Amino acid sequence: MTYAIEVIDVTKRYGNLRALAGVSLTVAPGEFFGLLGPNGAGKTTLISILAGLTRASSGAARIMGHDVTGAYREARRALGVVPQELVFDPFFTVREALTIQSGYFGLRDNRAWIDEVIENLDLGDKADVNMRALSGGMKRRVLVAQALVHKPPVIVLDEPTAGVDVELRQALWRFIRRLNRDGHTIVLTTHYLEEAEALCGRVAMLKQGRIVALDRTENLLRLHSGCYVELRLGGDLPRQLESLVAERREDGAIRLALPDYAEVEGVMAALREAGVHVQEMEIMQPDLEEVFVQIMQKS
């Protein structure tokens, strides 16, 4: 099988700093994959190696079977990267910037696809506006468009929605989902873990240059087998339940952390025995953010 992305025991050192310490992973064609980790975990370093912006100290990386150093032309053509930083050329309009980007990949007649990308990213009214006149959110849309302009089979999104408005975020994800349905492989790094939970079929979590978790998203969520019960009470919480309190909110709600769903009945029994009236109750499954925090603390 030819993987969309294959990383084999990759390390990267900057002097005494070890940014990556033997990372290995594979991403299948057509997969929506999440790459998560705290700041400084090595995510951007790994992306830079895949994009050819940085050379690994050891190990190998391939895009669609093409080695990123030995077959760098083929690897570059197969990859589109949306960088974290706002990098743009201030001397061109949006359409000119996308046309020039097409030229980098030898695409002569790419106007129809450029128009489609501009439309799907809601850049139509800015297509002939100079790049330096755009807002930060609009510049980020152009970065996404530049990554897609040569129709790469593999797309890496490095914090694509950082600092952008809700409207752009929704438009971007609609377009990216469509590309994924059409067969494009998507790799996403984000600090908005609700995005990763909703979008990614598999997730890798990095910490200090190492992968500390790699599994399907639903399997990672099952790692936390318990649940949360959020209560609003017409009285004081019974003393025997105090050890379960995870959070007391300013609006009066109390969140209890239970090791298992079966413990809910014990909570209700304690409340009935104490004569405490339950005004509101909600049972919630832990989300990916809580699983992430738990894994980072244990690693």
Image (spheres, rainbow, N blue to C red):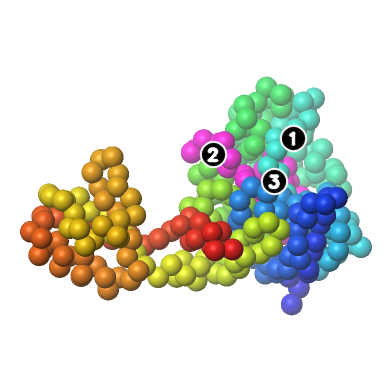
Of residues 86 and 116, which is closer to you in this image?
Answer: 86
Sequence order check, earlier mark of 1 and 2? 1
Most distant residue in the right direction: 70
Residue drawn at (61%, 54%) of the image: 37
The crowding category of the residue bearing disc 3, from other C-alpha atoms within 10 Å (few below 14, some 14 to 19, many at least 20), is many
Residue drawn at (16%, 65%) of the image: 270
> Residue 3: x percent and y percent?
73, 70
- Residue 224 in view (yes/no): yes
Question: What residue sits right under mark 1 in the picture?
Answer: 87
Question: What residue sits right under mark 2 in the picture?
Answer: 168
> Residue 152: x percent and y percent?
74, 55
Which region is colored magenta?
A: 143-167
Sequence order check, earlier mark of 2 and 3? 3
Residue type at tag 2: Leu
- How many marks do you count on the picture? 3
Mark-to-mark CA distance, 3 and 1? 10 Å
Of residues 117 and 31, which is closer to you in this image?
Answer: 31
SS type, badge 3: strand
Marks 2/3 in contact by CB < 8 Å: the verdict is no
Residue 82 is labelled as 3
Q: Residue 200: name its quadrant.
A: bottom right
